[in-house]
Amino acid sequence: MARKFLDLGWLVVTTRYVHDFKGDGSLWYIRRIPKHAQPHHGGKPQIRRSLKTRDPKVAAVAAAKMAKADDILWATLKGGEETGGPTSDVREAAKLLLVALNLTPGMLGRKLEMWEDPTETLDGYFQRRYGQAYVDARHGPYSDRMDVEDLWTPAEREAVRLLKEGETIPEPRLSDALEIYLKLHPRGRKAKFKADAERVFAQVYTTVGDLSLADCRRDHAHKLVEAMQSRGNKTLTVRRNLNTLVAVYNRGLREFDIHGRNNPFESIQIAEERQDIKERAPYTADELLTVSKACRAKDDTIRHIVALQSDTGARLGEIVGLLRSDVVLDGPVPHIIIQPHPKLGRTLKTPNSERKVPLVGEALWAAQRALAAPRKRDMTPSMWLFPQYARDGEIKATHASATINKWLKTLLKNEKTSHSFRHAMRDRLRHAKVPKEIQEILGGWGERSVGQGYGEGYTLEQLREHMLKVAPQAD
């Protein structure tokens, strides 16, 4: 807790961890050491360091720096993934770790040759940190078969590098490639896209460290796959993460003019890939009827989204991200226009996702009710059809999904989700003998063939005829 050091009424100075320990006016940094870090400090329960000043302001600044260094050190000693973030965070953590150990970057006085070992300087720390496992890996009879770096956190790897090379960063690293990838990618500034990429690389940094592009090897890729699977990731998720890593690495090779190097993360085999996929069961006709009745009874935003999804087969994000202008009710064929609005943060999964879908059955009812809802509540209409889940720059499909799936589970007493509506629509179209080409257009599935399109062979009227074959009768 913060301690009041000076109170003049008009000026109050408070600080943490600063004490007049000896009662002579000299100020000390005193702080309790967490239990997990006490072995590193010789079993002591408390740190006491003289701040070598009597000035509370000077002491407060010095104590804050010491506290930050200790926080990083203790987080590293505790382990986990907190020091496995972007390069800037890892480098800062490594510097503070060296400060806590009374070391400085490059303190060995020169850049060591490749065969020289800076680890000796940190031997004491690593022995306290990892115990016999470190001793065995570094000095044991089987040390030639063990890689001591496997024990280290990303911050510890960077600390060793800083001791060896100083502050210089001679080669571009994975995080540098990620930074430029996000900078140049069309969606790199989108919050979700950026967060997804950074989440993948947090696993990379924790597992193999923030390696230079030149140091990445095939075994790093295999180690990463093993680590992701050990955390419970499905093989499809592992593949998706690898695809992100491949794209970032390739961008790094191009932008940093690294030639003659293959991407070690490409074409990695994942054992039993896709065999762990749990097929999503589509909704039955009876379940669809139950859902439609419940939607009309509730008649609110969530139920409008559900009804639109159920009788269009669109993805949840495609429905949640509709603008009011994307809903056309005054033409001969009521329909929605699923299209990107990049400046507003509205994107689509694939180019083929852009399409027009006729509104029939429950979807037509839901669109009418959603457009009328703001007027019913005497509100100024937003440009978004569902402003609760859409703001400029962000479409909150995940938020809607959580609410919808919870409601569906309660209503139907099974594990089917909102995405099951899409699977159900595929089955409904197939059972109604709708031509596959029309199915692809309506659902935005597959590759668009030459000649496919709404003005090149199929009109909205024709598409509506096929949708009427599968839509339940509306009241």
Image (cartoon, helix red, strand yellow):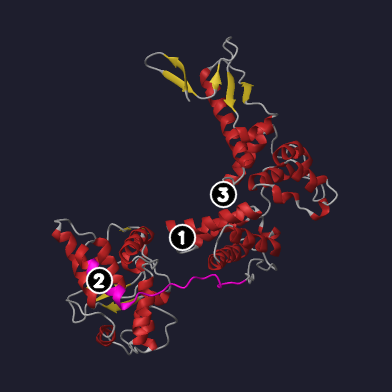
Image position, residue 346 (x, y; %): 36, 64
Image position, residue 210 (x, y; %): 63, 53
Q: Which stretch is magenta? A: 272-295
User: For the residue carrying disc 3, how many other residues have a C-alpha within 10 Å: few (<14), some (14-19), or many (20+)?
Assistant: many
Q: Earlier in the sequence, mark 3 or mark 1?
A: 3
Q: Residue, x 62% and y 25% (percent of image)?
A: 47
Image position, residue 269 (x, y; %): 64, 71
Give residue 85's mark: 3
Along the line of sight, the residue nearer the viewer: 211 or 242: 242
> Looking at the figure, which quarter contains the C terminus?
bottom left
Label 3, secondary structure: give it: loop
Vertical placement of 89 versus 21: above or below?
below
Real-space Cα distance between discs 2 and 1?
Answer: 33 Å
Along the line of sight, the residue nearer the viewer: 365 or 390: 365
Image position, residue 331 (x, y; %): 18, 79
Vertical placement of 54 versus 231: above or below?
above
Judging by the rendered image, the residue that carries numbered circle 1 is 193
Judging by the rendered image, the residue that carries numbered circle 2 is 292
Along the line of sight, the residue nearer the viewer: 299 or 110: 299
Label 2, secondary structure: give it: helix
Real-space Cα distance between discs 3 and 1?
Answer: 17 Å
**Residue 291 colored magenta?**
yes
Left or right, 73 with respect to 299, comes to right
- Amino acid type at circle 1 is Phe
Q: Residue, x 61% and y 53% (percent of image)?
A: 205
Q: Which is in the foreground here, disc 3 or disc 2?
A: 2
